[in-house]
Image (spheres, rainbow, N blue to C red):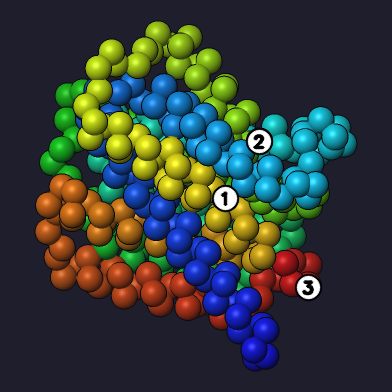
């Protein structure tokens, strides 16, 4: 491997690790705020609206590479809107709603199944070819995440909602994430990653806020300084930076390869939950971390293949 390729690989991995860490932190921050009484859907909307505003300086700095949306072709505008509806409106509305009925750790487990759906969608509809080792790695990663997080959580109130409701809503969010990943990778948009981050979050957040107000949600009249700090983290590092780094990584690697690193987000969520909520790590969770490492190695053994060519 040449020195230039080695640096590119390290940059790719560093970007993915940073992105998945920030995504993992957003589960914890979101759960803290929902527990404090902030309405789930409205929280998702204002979080991403603030994140879009925070991304704007990066977009301006990239000019003229980051073209305004109105200068794009009709096809590209439609694709950006679709990605915003899937990755922002769909994912965040469903995910934050599911956090009303389930702990952040379980939501992180379910969201980590996205690489499975990306792989299956690529195989069924896009003609992608994957080795059995990679399929095994994806399945092994889900098992590892389940062990690392631990799905037994007594904070769920079975009388508040059916036990299946939270996981079902969160699984729908995972489907939306997978669909957005496929669309973003295959769209070949002329937008830079930061411009795509800005536009999809802005479009998606406005739709979410409209939905929240239609549902009768209102922001609490009073919030403590601690809650505002959690919101600031959720909006900027947990959203702007996380999405921006994610699209940068997606532009450099294949959809299947990049999505496989989502297995790390719930692992980071667990480590942060230990610090915030005092969760105790068991030997099963340690074993889960080992399985995740093996899964990532299997999935990243070689280049993605799409109809016989690299993705």
Badge 3: residue crowd in 10 Å (few <14, some 14–19, many ≥20):
few
User: Callout 1: helix, strand or loop?
Assistant: helix
- Expressed as whole percent of the image width and height from the top left, the position of residue 26 reads 37, 44
The residue drawn where x is 35% and y is 34% is 231
Residue drawn at 62 percent across, 58 percent down: 248
Q: Residues within 10 Å of mark 1 (few under 14, many from 20)?
A: many
Q: Secondary structure at mark 3?
A: loop
Residue 117 in percent (x, y) is at: 55, 52
Q: Is residue 199 above or below residue 289?
A: above
Mark nearer the viewer, 3 or 2: 2
Q: Secondary structure at mark 2?
A: helix
Q: Which label is found at residue 199?
A: 2
- Decide if residue 26 is on the left or right side of residue 156: right
Q: What is the total number of numbered labels drawn onto the structure image?
A: 3
Split into 4 quadrants, where in the image is the C terminus?
Answer: bottom right
Seen at 71% across and 71% down, the residue is 305
Number of residues whose C-alpha sits closer than 10 Å to that of mark 2, classed few (under 14), some (14–19) or many (20 or more):
many
User: Residue 264, relative to residue 169: is it above or below?
Assistant: below
Q: Which residue is mark 3?
A: 308
| Residue 309, position as x, y percentages in the image | 78, 72
Asked whether 126 or 35 is in front, the reply is 35
Of the two numbered discs 2 and 1 on the same chain, state the one appearing first in sequence. Answer: 2
Q: Which residue is mark 1?
A: 244
- Residue 108: in sight, yes or no? yes
Quarter of the image holding residue 228?
top left
């Amino acid at each position: 491997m040449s020195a230039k390729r080695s640096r590119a690989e390290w940059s790719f991995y560093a970007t993915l690790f940073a992105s998945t860490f920030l995504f993992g932190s957003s589960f914890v921050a979101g759960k803290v705020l929902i527990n404090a009484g902030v309405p789930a859907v409205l929280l998702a909307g204002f979080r991403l609206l603030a994140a879009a505003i925070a991304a704007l300086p990066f977009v301006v700095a990239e000019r003229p590479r980051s073209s305004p949306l109105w200068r794009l072709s009709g096809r590209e505008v439609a694709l950006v809107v679709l990605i915003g509806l899937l990755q922002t409106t769909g994912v965040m509305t469903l995910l934050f709603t599911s956090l009303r009925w389930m702990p952040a750790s379980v939501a992180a487990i379910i969201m980590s199944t996205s690489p499975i759906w990306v792989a299956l969608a690529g195989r069924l509809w896009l003609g992608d070819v994957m080795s059995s080792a990679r399929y095994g790695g994806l399945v092994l990663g889900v098992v590892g995440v389940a062990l690392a997080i631990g799905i037994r959580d007594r904070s769920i109130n079975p009388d508040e909602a059916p036990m299946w409701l939270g996981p079902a809503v969160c699984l729908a969010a995972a489907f939306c994430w997978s669909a957005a990943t496929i669309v973003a990778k295959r769209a070949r948009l002329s937008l830079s990653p930061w411009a795509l981050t800005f536009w999809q979050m802005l479009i998606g957040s406005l739709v979410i806020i409209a939905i929240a107000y239609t549902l009768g949600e209102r922001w609490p009249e009073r919030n403590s300084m601690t809650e505002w700090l959690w919101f600031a983290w959720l909006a900027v590092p947990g959203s702007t930076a996380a999405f921006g780094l994610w699209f940068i990584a997606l532009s450099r690697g294949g959809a299947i390869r990049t999505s496989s690193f989502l297995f790390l987000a719930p692992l980071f969520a667990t480590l942060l939950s230990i610090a915030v909520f005092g969760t105790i790590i068991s030997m099963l969770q340690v074993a889960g971390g080992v399985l995740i490492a093996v899964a990532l190695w299997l999935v990243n053994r070689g280049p993605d293949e799409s109809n016989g060519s690299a993705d």
